[in-house]
C-alpha cells in the first residue's frame, strides 16, 4: 500500500504516493526525473548516489523514500543557481576532475558537505571526506585539487 510523502527537493516541494520499500534513490531518479544522482552498488559502498538530506551527506540508496517525508533534499541538480555552476562544479571542470563522470555527482556532493562544514580543509581532510566515494578512472589527485581550489574560491569571494 502506497504512502503519501511530502519532501522539498532542491527548493521545490513534492507530494507523492510511494511504495514503502522504494529507495530515496529510486524516488529521485524514477519519480522526479533527477537522474544526476547515480545508482552504483545499491549497498552504500560507492557513493555514486550521495545527496544532502537536511544538509547532511547520505547515500540515497540506503534510505527509503518514506523516511524522507518532511525533509529537505539537495541533489547535484540543486547546486547550480541561475544558470551558473556552483564553484565546486566549476572547479571539477577547470581541474579536469571528471573522466567518465559517473562518480562526479557523488564526489561533488561529498565536497559540498565538507566545504559547508570546513571552508579550509587540508588535503588529508579532503581525502577523508571523499573516502566513501569510489572512482574507477582516476588516481583522485585531480579531484582533491578541484576541491581545494573550490575551497579557495569560496573563501576568497
Image (tube, rainbow, N blue to C red):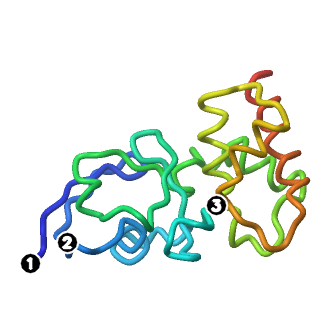
Residue pictured at 63% horizontal, 48% vertical: 110
Q: Closer to the camera, 143 or 43? A: 43
Q: Quadrant of residue 114?
A: top right
The percent coordinates of residue 8 (x first, y second) are 32, 49
Q: Are marks 2 and 3 in contact (CB under 8 Å)?
A: no
Q: Position of residue 89 (x, y in %)?
A: 72, 50
The numbered mark, 2 or 3, whose residue comes first in the sequence reads 2
Q: Nearer the viewer, mark 2 or mark 3?
A: 2
State left or right for residue 51 relative to residue 68. right
Q: Locate residue 27: give its quadrant.
A: bottom left
The local secondary structure at tag 3 comes to: helix
The reply to whether callout 3 and callout 1 are in contact (CB within 8 Å) is: no
Q: Position of residue 7 (x, y in %)?
A: 27, 52
Mark 2 to mark 1 CA distance (whole Å): 7 Å
Q: Residues within 10 Å of mark 3 (few under 14, many from 20)?
A: many
Q: Which mark is residue 1?
A: 1
Determine whether the residue tagged by mark 2 lies in a helix, strand or loop. Answer: loop
Q: Is residue 95 above or below residue 121?
A: below
**Horizontal side, residue 101 vs residue 15: left or right:** right
Q: Residue furthest top?
A: 156
Residue found at x 67% / y 52%: 108
Left or right of residue 65, residue 41 in this image: right
Number of the label disc, if any, that sits on residue 20: 2
Relative to residue 37, is residue 62 drawn left or right?
Answer: left
- Identify the residue under disc 3: 105
What's the residue at 39%, 41% (across, down)? 54
The image quadrant where one finds the N terminus is bottom left
Observer-nearest of 119 and 45: 45
* N-term-proximal mark, 2 vs 1: 1
Contact (Cβ within 8 Å) of mark 2 with mark 1 = yes
Amino acid at each position: 500500500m502506497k504512502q503519501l510523502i511530502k519532501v522539498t527537493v532542491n527548493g521545490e516541494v513534492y507530494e507523492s504516493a510511494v511504495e514503502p520499500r522504494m529507495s530515496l534513490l529510486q524516488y529521485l531518479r524514477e519519480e522526479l526525473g533527477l537522474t544526476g544522482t547515480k545508482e552504483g552498488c545499491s549497498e552504500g559502498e560507492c557513493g555514486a548516489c550521495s545527496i544532502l538530506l537536511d544538509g547532511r551527506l547520505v547515500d540515497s540508496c540506503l534510505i527509503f523514500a518514506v523516511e524522507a517525508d518532511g525533509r529537505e533534499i539537495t541533489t547535484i541538480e540543486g547546486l547550480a543557481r541561475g544558470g551558473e555552476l556552483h564553484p565546486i562544479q566549476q572547479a571539477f571542470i577547470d581541474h579536469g576532475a571528471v573522466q567518465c563522470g559517473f562518480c562526479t555527482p557523488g564526489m561533488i556532493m561529498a565536497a559540498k558537505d565538507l566545504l559547508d562544514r570546513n571552508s579550509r580543509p587540508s588535503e588529508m581532510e579532503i581525502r577523508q571526506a571523499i573516502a566513501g566515494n569510489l572512482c574507477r578512472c582516476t588516481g583522485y589527485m585531480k579531484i582533491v585539487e578541484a576541491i581545494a581550489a573550490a575551497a579557495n574560491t569560496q573563501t576568497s569571494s
